[in-house]
């Protein structure tokens, strides 16, 4: 049974069979490895084991594009195409993506680019079909060397060093896919009958509606191909803070519809973010402006009227590749006070500042001021594992301990915890490395922003289960962060260095 009622499969996985041939005999193929990651992360995100993924292990071998494959596509809720040179050249693969688009539209399609490919010839069928899905979510599993122009494919099935990046990209895909599947599941459920004689609304319904209306909405402008990865990264992080990212559907090709849809999304947003790349971008028919330019102009009108905050960013060191883009960038530089040329982490910090007011102190009414404030982070699956650690910190060491991932109800309060903490401890237990890296990155950024005093200590506590990745962790010369390893039962001795560092720093301050 699929997660989405009314469908036989939740995901149709489309790929060229040559892309799953093992690089090393006996090892899994690339698609095998990706599907395994996809299944695991979908189950975690959906909280359900009922996730059905269809792969086509033999139908292509039958030759003709059959009615059987059409029926399977029609019975699938979402479609993931793993694009590569072979995929684009394959009439079968291209027909799969075209048929699904014909059956459901493009808004249920996700593109993965496993290997960089040349654009199909203008007159080819592949070019025509790929144009239909050019604006859908795309994630690239390769890197391009800016100096040499060479492409380096991620090969997590044979290279462990590529696994963290592959996990990061897969989880970004899964978060968007989860949102889609949950929406389809909700739409498929029978709705309760509405009685016209009643004028009251249930408390639960009112709360759900209020929560939906109160969520912060951010317009993250569609960008050029060179910054798609950066946009996906920012979108993923904003979504982790329960922020609605707009637009949440592919932009239309028609210029009039495009302007109407962008205007509607901007009207609902608190902040608009524009990522300027080296290229000018595609220009819709009957328009003289590119899509990025249209989005900027519409947002700038609202900003000038005082109805929207606008943030424009261009990577530090990047130059415009043509005259139109150079002119656009120069105009933005001269007319927009919020034009930022910086690294990606600086952009993220600026986004958080725009969305969050000056934080209040969540520790103010929680015991004597001379006690140390410690923010303890852990994955929900590790709550039982940290109970002994938590009890020791508050009952034996008399620390004021807060749990931001449980207690913070918004981006503002999460930021407040970190900026007013005296110390931070991140528990690394059953969560995957991707979660830990992302969480530590966010902690580092928030604790360094607008603090009036430095942290006394930071530490990562590597607990059970033991993994090769945890074994490789080590502290630097300044013990920042301090790495604590204990794969067995908790004892106070494991915290001696951390507590000692806290007390020494407290005394010095």
Image: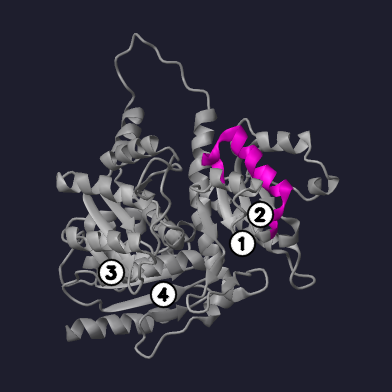
Badge count: 4
> Which element is circle 4 on?
strand
Category of crowding for the residue at label 1, using alpha-carbon neighbours closer than 10 angstroms: few (below 14), some (14–19), many (at least 20): some
Q: In the rendered view of the protein, which quadrant contains the C terminus?
A: bottom left
Q: Earlier in the sequence, mark 2 or mark 1?
A: 2
> Does residue 24 appear left or right of residue 271 in this picture?
right
Q: Quadrant of residue 224?
A: bottom left
Q: Would you name the residue on which mark 1 appears? A: 117
Please report the bounds of the magenta region as a residue range.
86-109
Q: In the rendered view of the protein, which quadrant contains the N terminus?
A: top right
Residue furthest to the bottom: 477
Instruction: Report how far apart the C-alphas of labels 4 and 1 lie in the structure.
Output: 41 Å
Q: Would you name the residue on which mark 4 appears? A: 460
* Relative height, residue 1 to residue 15 (above, below): above
Give the main secondary structure, helix, strand or loop, of the magenta stretch: helix
Q: Earlier in the sequence, mark 3 or mark 4?
A: 3
Identify the mark at residue 378; answer none if there is no mark: none
> Which element is circle 3 on?
strand
Which label lies toward us, 1 or 3? 1
* Relative height, residue 236 to residue 94 (above, below): below
Identify the mark at residue 88; answer none if there is no mark: 2
Residue furthest to the right: 62
Instruction: Report how far apart the C-alphas of labels 4 and 2 lie in the structure.
Output: 45 Å
Q: Would you name the residue on which mark 3 appears? A: 341
Which residue is drawn at the image coordinates 43% and 80% (left, top)?
483
> Does residue 393 appear left or right of residue 337 in this picture?
right
């Amino acid at each position: 049974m699929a997660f989405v009622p009314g469908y036989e499969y939740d995901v149709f996985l489309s790929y060229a069979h040559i892309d799953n041939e093992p690089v090393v005999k006996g090892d899994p193929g690339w698609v095998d490895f990706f599907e395994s990651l996809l299944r695991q992360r979908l189950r975690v995100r959906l909280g359900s084991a009922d996730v059905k993924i269809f792969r086509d292990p033999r139908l292509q071998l039958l030759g003709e594009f059959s009615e059987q494959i059409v029926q399977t596509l029609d019975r699938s809720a979402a479609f993931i195409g793993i694009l590569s040179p072979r995929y684009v050249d394959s009439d079968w693969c291209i027909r799969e993506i075209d048929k699904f688009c014909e059956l459901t539209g493009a808004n249920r399609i996700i593109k993965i680019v496993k290997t960089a490919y040349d654009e199909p010839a203008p007159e080819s069928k592949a070019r025509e079909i790929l144009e239909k899905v050019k604006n859908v979510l795309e994630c690239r599993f390769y890197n391009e060397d800016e100096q040499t122009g060479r492409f380096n494919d991620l090969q997590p099935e044979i290279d462990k060093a590529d696994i963290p990046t592959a996990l990061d990209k897969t989880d970004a895909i899964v978060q968007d896919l989860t949102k889609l599947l949950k929406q389809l599941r909700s739409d498929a459920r029978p709705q309760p009958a509405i009685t016209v004689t009643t004028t009251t609304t249930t408390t639960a319904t009112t709360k759900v509606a209020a929560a939906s209306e109160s969520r912060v909405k951010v317009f993250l402008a569609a960008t050029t191909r060179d910054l798609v990865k950066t946009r996906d990264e920012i979108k993923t992080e904003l979504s982790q803070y329960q922020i609605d990212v707009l637009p949440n559907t592919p932009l239309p090709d028609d210029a009039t519809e495009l302007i109407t849809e962008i205007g509607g999304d901007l009207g609902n947003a608190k902040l608009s973010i524009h990522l300027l790349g080296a290229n000018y971008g595609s220009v819709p028919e009957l328009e003289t402006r590119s899509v990025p330019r249209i989005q900027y102009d519409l947002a700038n009108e609202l900003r000038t009227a005082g109805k929207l905050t606008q943030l424009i960013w261009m990577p530090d060191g990047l130059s415009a590749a043509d005259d139109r883009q150079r002119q656009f960038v120069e105009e933005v530089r001269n007319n927009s006070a919020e034009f930022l040329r910086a690294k990606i982490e600086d952009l993220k910090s600026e986004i958080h500042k725009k969305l969050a007011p000056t934080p209040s102190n969540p520790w103010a009414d929680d015991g004597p001021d001379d006690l140390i404030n410690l923010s303890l982070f852990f994955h929900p699956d590790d709550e039982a594992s940290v109970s002994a650690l938590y009890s020791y910190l508050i009952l034996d060491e008399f620390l004021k301990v807060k749990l931001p991932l449980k207690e913070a109800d918004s981006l503002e309060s999460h930021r407040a915890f970190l900026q007013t903490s005296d110390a931070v401890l991140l528990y690394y237990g059953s969560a995957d490395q991707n979660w830990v890296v992302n969480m530590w990155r966010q902690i580092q950024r928030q604790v360094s922003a607008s603090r009036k005093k430095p942290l006394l200590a930071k530490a990562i506590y590597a607990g059970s289960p033991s993994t090769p990745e945890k074994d490789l962790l080590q502290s630097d010369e300044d013990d920042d962060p301090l790495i604590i390893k204990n794969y067995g039962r908790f004892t106070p001795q494991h915290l001696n260095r951390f507590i000692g560092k806290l007390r020494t720093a407290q005394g010095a301050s």
